[in-house]
Image (cartoon, coloured by chain):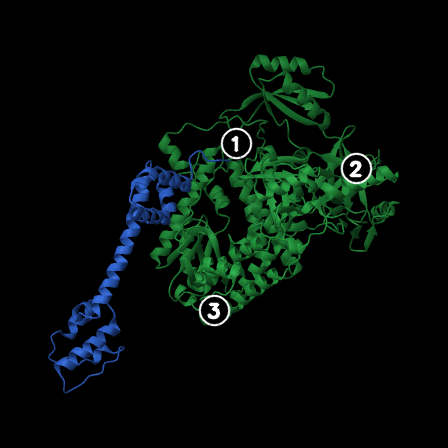
Chain colours: A blue, B green
Amino acid sequence: MGRTIASITQTWLQEEAALKRFERALRKDDQLLLEELLVRSRQHLAEASYASNLYPLDMYLIAILLEVYKELKALQRQAAQAEASTDPQVQLNSGKEARFLQLLNETLESFAPQETLELAAESPQAVPADLSVSVSYTAFEEAP
Amino acid sequence: MSSTTFRGWLLDLYLNQQDGLTLWFISESDDSRVCFTQRFPVTFYAAGAPDDLRRLWKALRKEPGVTKLARQQKQDVFVADPVDVLAIDVDTPAHQVELFHRLEDKFPTLIWYDADVTISTRYIARYGAFPLALCQLEADNQNRIQSLETLNSRWDVMPALPPLRILELAPDVDPTHSPAQALNLRSDRFSKSLPLDEQGSYLHAINAALVAYDPDILVTDWGDSWLLPFLLRQSEQLGIPLALNRDPNRPVRWQKEITYFSYGHIIYRPEEAHLFGRCHVDRKSAMMWSDYSLAGTLEMARVTTLPIEKAARVSPGQGISAMQVITALQKDILVPYQKRQVEEFKSGLQLIQSDRGGMIYQPKVGLHSDVAEVDFVSMYPAVIIHGNISPEVPLPDVLSPASEELGVVPLTLKPIYEKRVALKAKTRFYPPDHPMAKTLKARSAALKWLLVVCFGFLGYKNARYGRIEAHEAVTKGGREVLLRAKEVAEEEGFEVLHMYVDALWLKKKGCSKPEHFEDVMHKISSRTGLAIALDGIYRWVAFLPSKTDPRVPIPNRYFGIFQSGEIKVRGLEARRRDTPRWIAQVQTEMLTCLGQARTRAELPEALRAAFQVYEQAVKQLKQGKVPPELLVVNGKVSYALEAYKSATASVRAARQLQAAGMQIRPGQRVRFLFMQGEPDVYAWELGGQVDPAKLDQHKYLELLAKAGGSVLLPFGIDPQVLMEWTLKGGIQLPLDTWNKAF
């Protein structure tokens, strides 16, 4: 028993070897980045094997794109969370109910300094509907 | 001529020049061992051009031993229409073997069928009798069998087995390392130590045991490679006859040593000593002894019909091959002598798409809790049976069979698969440490190996019933099944942490009990048509990255603990054959400590305990308290020693043995120790005392750090830091970092 076609890992090594001249010509800091990019494609070897594409490099590039996009999305989420701690509107959209309620309390306090309201995270319905706040409760219900 | 009726279990069967066959039975009524003979004419076939067949007919007309020649039409599974053949009836199997080899040279253009079928295979095809089958026979007063009927089936889940007499004979030490001083002789009735004195009194003692106990199976250690050759040599030199065989007219039969290539490995099999009338099983050269012991070996012999001695030594592939031949003979299909099918033409793209193995994903590296491992029950055999994949029938459209009548391969596999399922079901009735549970597990393991190799044999170029397209159809089916399972799991909200050919690791918040996974498994089963089982739920499982690049996940490197407390380890040093025993023990002990953690809260304590084990091991090694025999590395040479340009440690050790006059064959295991200075290795087989102070402590510390690092890595301990700590000491290890890893 033996395979005629190289395994997906062997193919990956061949593709990596094919980039060696390109890599050599790169500046040192670019070389390091390229190496990091290539490693990302190894996360999807099984999928590349299943695809059985005539040009495996296409699959590796898509695998790299996918991983980079995944990291981009993760960074976007982190950035959004970081921003949310300073921007009340973003915080409303962040989907964190507890933070949202904390923010709501703060907002209510600022609009009604005489009556301080403490809202429990479990009972958002406790918010009085007639309070004159800039954002109505029904709108908050839509918050993710 | 008067005839008697006899009932008993078939123990041994072999060719006999005069009568055809010699058969040994264990009597059901009085525990005696009885020898019979039987006439056994055999038939083989030739096909080819009409002129060639006529020349053959003319040549055979007056051939002694040929009893009949007839023109017939028979079915060759690889040919659509029946084939015209010349059927050649020969009086004895021994004549047939000799005649066929002459004819093969004389008529090279003819195609031969049923020409090299072994005698045990022919016998079961005709009488249904297999090793340890209960038979009833009629014999004349000279013990010549007139008729025989088999009373049980090789597919019986709980068969009535004979009361086998087993005699164990082993040297007191590993004779490849140091000279044996005595032999240990053991049975269910006695246990003796026989000093190897100059007068050879041990030979008399062995003879006496063989006569008095009359064993059916002689179980030895190093029997093939050292013990039996030593005893026979001593017997000759001292003039003390040694009657190892039950058949007094036969000497021990020696089968030559061989080296062969199998599943990417070079395998060496030493010379084999075969007995007549009883069986010799050498535990050290038995193929799968560690997996399924004697119970599994006997199951393998019964199911495959290979003689017990052969079933113990050959790969399960030979067993499955024999079973396929039996299926063909029983269906009156011709058994080709040589395979004539070639691979079909494929375009480049078709080749790229079809020449693929199973799906092996990259796991999500790290520590995960409450993970279920589910796997398909014997996935490839199930795909073969479900899709009716056989070389002679149209191949399925992914998983839907293209024809209803089962081909030779699924027909052979189906009863093995069903018997294994039945054995596994029976095992559940017994506690895990019950002797019956162990026996059932060993038998089930033997069947598992048959099922495993059957798929490989479909793609083996020399397999009679092999065809690469059928092999590819199986892997294609397997990939489809796994992807369907993934789709179902994700639809049901599970996270698929890992997939490996036939197994999936699933996780979902709130799912930690078997019943939480029943629904998804049921849905997977109905979408794929294959049975899926819950292997277990891990309290936690760690998927490890590559040792060389921590960013790269490795599919088969993980460990975890099931809720039952059972630890599962794959790809770690403890599982490798070349890892020194002591290092494997330390790693296993560390894993056992971690396994004590039943909850996440208990993990820090367990981690501390595991580290203490490691720390203690480092101390022991540095103080030279580890016995050298536990530090032996079990290496291997894959090629002839002259072929190596740069010598690995195994090769350097092998060259020491060669210089000492020993023969080293490719595939042979070579055990050695790492030593300080030059030479840096010491071949264990050279014998003698090894001074522990001269061992290469640094090298062993490195090996230990690697093994410890694999276990501690998922808990946030950098293997490099551990290595430095081990070699130099004094670095503070961040034992609290595990928390970040979860």
In the structure shown, which secondary structural element does the residue marked by tag 1 occupy?
A: loop
Same-chain check, marks 2 and 1: yes
**Residue shown at 64% from the left, 28% from the top:** B116
Q: Is residue B91 left or right of residue A109?
A: right
Could you say which is closer to the camera, residue B560 or residue B402? B560
Q: Which residue is mark 3?
A: B603
Q: Is B360 positioned to the left or the right of B258 in the image?
A: left
Q: Up-down: is B98 above or below B147?
A: above
Q: Which residue is mark 2?
A: B36
Question: Residue B175: x, y in percent?
Answer: 73, 47
Q: Nearer the viewer, residue B21 or B540?
A: B540
Question: Disc 2 sits on a residue from what chain?
Answer: B
Amino acid found under the numbered disc labelled 3: Leu
- Asked if marks 3 and 2 fall on the same chain, the answer is yes
- Crowding near the residue tagged with mark 3, few <14, some 14–19, many ≥20 C-alpha atoms within 10 Å: some
Which amino acid, mark 2?
Answer: Phe
Left or right relative to B352: residue B698: right
The crowding category of the residue bearing disc 2, from other C-alpha atoms within 10 Å (few below 14, some 14 to 19, many at least 20), is: some
Quadrant of image for the N terminus of chain B: top right
Position of B244 relative to B629 (above/below): above
Subunit bearing disc 3: B
The residue sitting at the bottom extreme is A114
- Label 2, secondary structure: give it: strand
Residue under circle 1? B461
x and y, in percent, of residue A60 in the image: 33, 43
Point out the frontmost of discs 2 and 1. 1
Amino acid type of the residue tagged 1 in the rendering: Lys
- Of the numbered discs 3 and 2, the one sitting upstream in the chain is 2
Q: Report, in whole angstroms, how far the alpha carbon at label 2 lies from the one at label 1.
A: 39 Å
